[in-house]
């Protein structure tokens, strides 16, 4: 089910909105909750929420309101060594946070900063996780001084500098 919703939502705009209108956000969040021991469901669900939230601020709000950020963070904590969960989790948190202060704050409140910093630390050899993590921390910090402080307090700046040193050409 999550794979089908992902394929629809990734087409953007109206298609992502159609997934929201059909109750897809709640279905994906329920899948994350119902299958905590299935890494495949966890990873695909994070990717699906990212695709839905990428459809715009209203979609990001729907994901945040349904507890999507909280469940993505929970998946990232459950599977710290799984690059797909970490990369797609960071993408989902990025797509929520990039829509503005309130959305970035929802990611902070869900524990997203610590989860993203942990992803940076756990996957130093994966340029995809490093890039998505740095982008997510930037989107969170852009959400205002309190959010930037949360990133700094969690060691986000230190980890971003380390990633920049590891991948100077990226």
Image (cartoon, grey):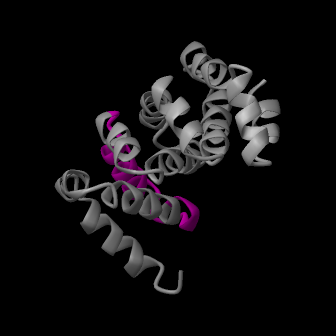
**Residue at 35%, 42% in the rendered image:** 102
Q: Nearer the viewer, residue 48 or 53?
A: 53
Q: Is residue 122 magenta?
A: yes
Task: Answer with the quarter of the image where residue 106 lies.
Answer: top left
Q: Quick check: 112 above or below 166? A: above
Which x, y percent locates residue 17?
A: 71, 36
Task: Answer with the quarter of the image where residue 159 lies.
Answer: bottom left
Side of 113 where 91 appears, left or right? right
Which x, y percent locates residue 20?
A: 68, 28
Which x, y percent locates residue 15?
A: 79, 40
Side of 47 where 2 appears, left or right? right
**Residue at 49%, 51% in the rendered image:** 94
Task: Answer with the quarter of the image where residue 59 lies.
Answer: top right
**Residue at 32%, 74% in the rendered image:** 161
Q: Is residue 104 magenta?
A: no
Q: Quick check: 117 above or below 107? A: below
User: Which residues are drawn in magenta?
Assistant: 110-129
Which x, y percent locates residue 169?
A: 52, 86
Quadrant where the N terminus is found in the figure: top right
């Amino acid at each position: 089910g999550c794979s089908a919703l992902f394929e629809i939502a990734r087409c953007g705009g109206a298609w992502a909105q159609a997934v929201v209108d059909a109750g897809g956000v709640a279905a994906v969040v329920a899948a994350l909750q119902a299958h905590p021991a299935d890494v495949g469901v966890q990873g695909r669900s994070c990717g699906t929420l990212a695709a839905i939230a990428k459809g715009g601020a209203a979609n990001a709000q729907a994901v945040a309101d349904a507890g999507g950020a909280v469940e993505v963070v929970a998946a990232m904590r459950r599977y710290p060594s799984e690059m797909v969960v970490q990369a797609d989790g960071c993408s989902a948190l990025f797509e929520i946070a990039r829509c503005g202060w309130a959305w970035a704050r929802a990611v902070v409140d869900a524990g997203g900063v610590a989860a993203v910093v942990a992803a940076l630390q756990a996957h130093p050899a994966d340029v995809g996780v490093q890039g998505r993590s740095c982008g997510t921390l930037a989107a969170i910090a852009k959400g205002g001084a309190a959010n930037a402080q949360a990133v700094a307090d969690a060691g986000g700046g230190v980890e971003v500098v380390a990633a920049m040193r590891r991948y100077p050409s990226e």
